Image (cartoon, rainbow, N blue to C red):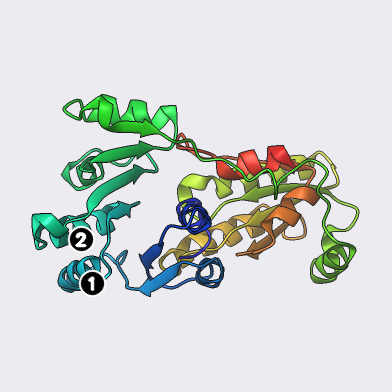
Amino acid sequence: LDYGGVERGTVEIANELVRRNHRSIVISATGRLVPELIASGSEHIDLPIGVKSITSIKLIPKLSRLFVEKNVNIVHVRSRLPAWLTHFALKKIHSDKKPILITTVHGPYTVNRYSKIMMSGYRIIAISKYIKKYILNNYPDIDKNKIEIIPRGVDSNNYYSEYKPSSSWIDNWYREFPDLKNKFLITLPARLTRWKGQNDFIEIITKLNKRGLNVHGLIVGGIDKRKQKYLQELKLLVKKNNVETCITFTGHRDDIKNILSISDIVLSLAKIPEAFGRTALEALTL
């Protein structure tokens, strides 16, 4: 349960359920967002349901027991592997104790049988009109009346145009990144994965630098351990383009709102259509 659009949405929905006096249980591997989740009143059960391994099959009976022991009424799955594990777990539960299954389709998954599990919910949540269109175009046998568009959004209590970081945060920020002082700051907030366009961002900063513009590129986002090779590719590209002093990799940051607020320009460079560009909307509200 680390920082990301799906993960952040999970925490926000859980928090709202608690606020409305419902019981909220989140099953996932642990991560940076777990303390916030627990502090808001949800229960967290640490199970690695997102690990693509044959050993994940062993989690099916555990999930069945949890659903029954916790007297779960609704199971809401938000990605494909957990959906498959839940599918088989529910088959082991007697009909009078079986929870209702809700799915949320967060993106235009590759169209195949593995992805179709996300269309198996009693109700299917699409996070945008684009995603509803994707579902109907690629899975025409799905009852369109099962699909409900619930757009993702930004909390206007936390993101608003008058927001300013504290002076202490600004002091600490420039202490950590002194090269950013008095620079025109261009930021790309996205986890480090090839389709998010970090390589294109580096080329943009390179061209601006060659024009003599006083810009600095900020690549903000964590990286999966399995994608360290991609990070090295990006750093080699920075070196090849001779822009080491013009681009900074911050890694994962919990203060993304502050970073967006001090940026002069925030870019979204996804190579394929985004289901819903959360960071773009966050930047627009600041």
Label 2, residues with CA under 10 Å away: few <14, some 14-19, many ≥20: many
Task: Name the amino acid, label 2.
Answer: Leu
Image-quadrant location for residue 53 = bottom left
Residues at badges 1 and 2 in contact (C-beta under 8 Å)? no
x, y (%) of residue 278? 56, 43
- Looking at the picture, tell me which residue is in the foreground, 151 or 286: 151
Q: Position of residue 199 (x, y in %)?
A: 56, 48
Q: Is residue 155 visible?
A: yes
Secondary element type, mark 1: helix
State the image coordinates of residue 120 (x, y, percent, origin top left).
20, 42
Q: Quadrant of the C terminus?
A: top right
| Residue at horizontal 27 percent and vertical 61 percent from the top | 72
Quarter occupied by the N terminus? bottom left
156 above or below 137? below
Residue indicated by mark 1: 69
- Secondary structure at badge 2 equals helix
